[in-house]
Amino acid sequence: MRIVCLCGGVGGAKLARGLYDVLEPGELTVIGNVGDDLTVLGVHVSPDLDSVLYALAGVNDEERGWGRAGETWRALESARSWGGEGWFQLGDLDLGVHLVRTEALRRGDPLSAVTERLVRAAGIEAHLLPATDDPLRTHVVTPAGRFAFQEWFVARGHRDEVDDVVVAGDEEAGPAPGVLEAIERADGIVIAPSNPYVSIDPILAVRPIRDVLASRRAACVAVSPLIGGRAVKGPLDRMLSRMAGGTTPAHVAARYAGLIDALVIDEADAPARAGVPLAVTRTLMTGREDARRLAAFTLEVVS
Ligand code: GDP
């Protein structure tokens, strides 16, 4: 069963890991967001691709919720002490990936090629494709001005309300090799419980990806990132309230109008109506077992 999962960072990566666990080797293709990518201290960082990479490799830190287990921060502390920028958390283990990726990009390799190599190096039997190899950057428009995504999210602690999200470079961006084919050949498509505005929209901002999804042959199911109308973590509930007028399943489904055939929601949000069929279960993933259970449930809905 070939499954494609559109995925953001940590929230989405938990379900991607669950899917990887319940599917056969080689059956999962994750299409990841690159709108959050940035350059820090000279290295190219792809935070969402790395969250998926670490989750699939089983080296993610489940307690902290992001980054690698057993991480240390000595290189960053040293950089700070020498006057370098220190606002973005770069762990010592994490830096290894950034160095390998940055060197490959400098040599002229596309992001998709180096991501593929990282996946193979980790022994992961799934595909991880960036939505695009082209520069695509998410910006948020707030009452305090327009910020690059990580400046708002990390440096400003996402304290500003968001009036709009702009994906710069969307008109020029083409899909990375294999992305359209994976969606066309999929037996089912899953949109992970990621932030629709800043994790999934930047994938759909690549026009051919949205078009191929809109004319899909296989069913597409999204898993809601809200539980009881609240984000498990992060600013999504505030964003949806302000930009869409509420945080019900209908507000989540409306973000994916025309693109999904069903929405998986939490028991805390039922009963509800959303214009698409709803499938109700517990959606909180506190560990691998929860993720496997939600993945298996979602696969039942999609097939
Ligand atoms: P992140 O910001 O790096 O975590 O990237 P994502 O966009 O992939 O995920 C953010 C969203 O994941 C938030 O809106 C959370 O509410 C949602 N989320 C996180 N953990 C869970 C979970 O266990 N279950 C569900 N349903 N949503 C989750």
Image (cartoon, rainbow, N blue to C red):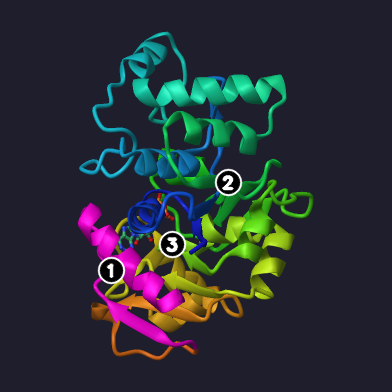
* Depth check, front residue: 201 or 61: 61
Is 67 on the left-hand or right-hand side of 31? left
**Disc 1 target residue:** 283
Q: Which mark is residue 192?
A: 3
Residue at image mark 2 = 129
Which secondary structure lies at badge 1? loop
Q: Is residue 287 above or below residue 249?
A: above
Q: Which residues are magenta?
A: 276-303
Q: Is mark 1 within 8 Å of ligand 1?
A: yes
Q: CA distance from mark 1 to mark 2?
A: 25 Å
Give the mark, 1 or 2, whose residue is nearer the N terminus.
2
State which mark lies toward you, 1 or 2. Answer: 2
Residue at 31% of width from left, 33% of height from top? 68
Where residue 219 appears, as percent x and y from the top left, is 54, 76
Q: Residues within 10 Å of mark 1 (few under 14, many from 20)?
A: many
Mark sitting on residue 14: none
Cβ of mark 3 under 8 Å from ligand 1: the answer is: yes
The answer to which quarter of the image holds residue 63 is top left
Ligand 1 image position (quadrant): bottom left
Q: Is residue 158 above or below residue 164?
A: above
Sooner in the amino-acid sequence: mark 3 or mark 2: 2
- What whole-number distance in Å separates the C-alpha atoms at marks 1 and 3? 11 Å
Rendered residue at 31%/56% (across/down)? 233
**Mark 2 is on which residue type?**
Leu
* Residue 299 visible to an observer of this rendering: yes
